[in-house]
Image: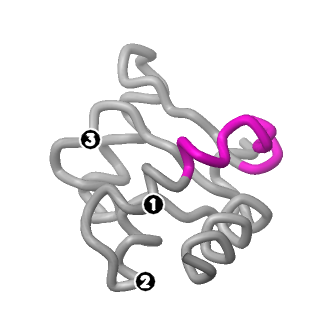
């Protein structure tokens, strides 16, 4: 499953950059129109049984915030775009 490739979560990027919770999500919202789902990121819908199970696995591994309902997983390309954007700010 492509979602299981090496990926980064919002929480992991926030932590790597020593940024407050929500920083990476706000950057994603600004860049979202230029991102391609399936190439730059994957969206996990908490209402979908399979995605909900994956989100719970991420929660147990402490890769997402405890309050996460839906999750975004970023590929290498998405991760690099977000980090570049946030480091340039």
Instruction: Name the quadrant of the C terminus.
Output: bottom right
Q: Residues within 10 Å of mark 2 (few under 14, many from 20)?
A: few
Find the residue positioned furthest to the left: 66
Task: Decide whether residue 33 is among the magenta residues.
Answer: yes
Q: Tell which circle, 2 or 1, labels the residue nearer the N-terminal end.
A: 2
Residue named by callout 3: 68
The residue positioned 30% from the left and 42% from the top of the image is 56
Disc 1: CA contacts within 10 A as few (<14), some (14-19) or many (>=20): many
Instruction: Give percent across and percent down for residue 58.
Output: 36, 53
**Circle 1 sits on which residue?**
24
Identity of the residue drawn at 66% across and 48% down: 31
Q: 60 left or right of 50?
A: left
Q: Report, in whole angstroms, how far the alpha carbon at label 1 lies from the one at label 3.
A: 14 Å
- The first of marks 1 and 3 along the sequence is 1
Q: Look at the picture and state if 73 lies above or below 5.
A: above
Measuring from the top left, give residue 2's x and y in whole percent: 75, 45
Residue 20 lies, with reference to residue 10, above or below; the image says below
Q: Which residue is mark 2?
A: 17
Decide if residue 15 is on the left or right side of residue 75: left
What SS does tag 3 mark? loop
Marks 1/3 in contact by CB < 8 Å: the verdict is: no
Pick the residue in front: 29 or 40. 29
In reply to whether residue 66 is colored magenta, the answer given is: no
Q: Quadrant of residue 10?
A: bottom left
């Amino acid at each position: 499953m492509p979602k299981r490739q090496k990926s980064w979560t919002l929480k992991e990027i926030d932590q790597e950059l020593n940024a407050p919770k929500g920083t990476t999500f706000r950057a994603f919202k600004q860049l979202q129109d230029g991102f391609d789902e399936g190439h730059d990121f994957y969206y996990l819908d908490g209402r979908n049984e399979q995605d909900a199970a994956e989100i719970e696995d991420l929660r147990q591994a402490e890769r997402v915030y405890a309050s996460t309902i839906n999750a975004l997983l970023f590929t290498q390309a998405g991760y690099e775009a977000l980090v570049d954007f946030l480091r340039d700010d």
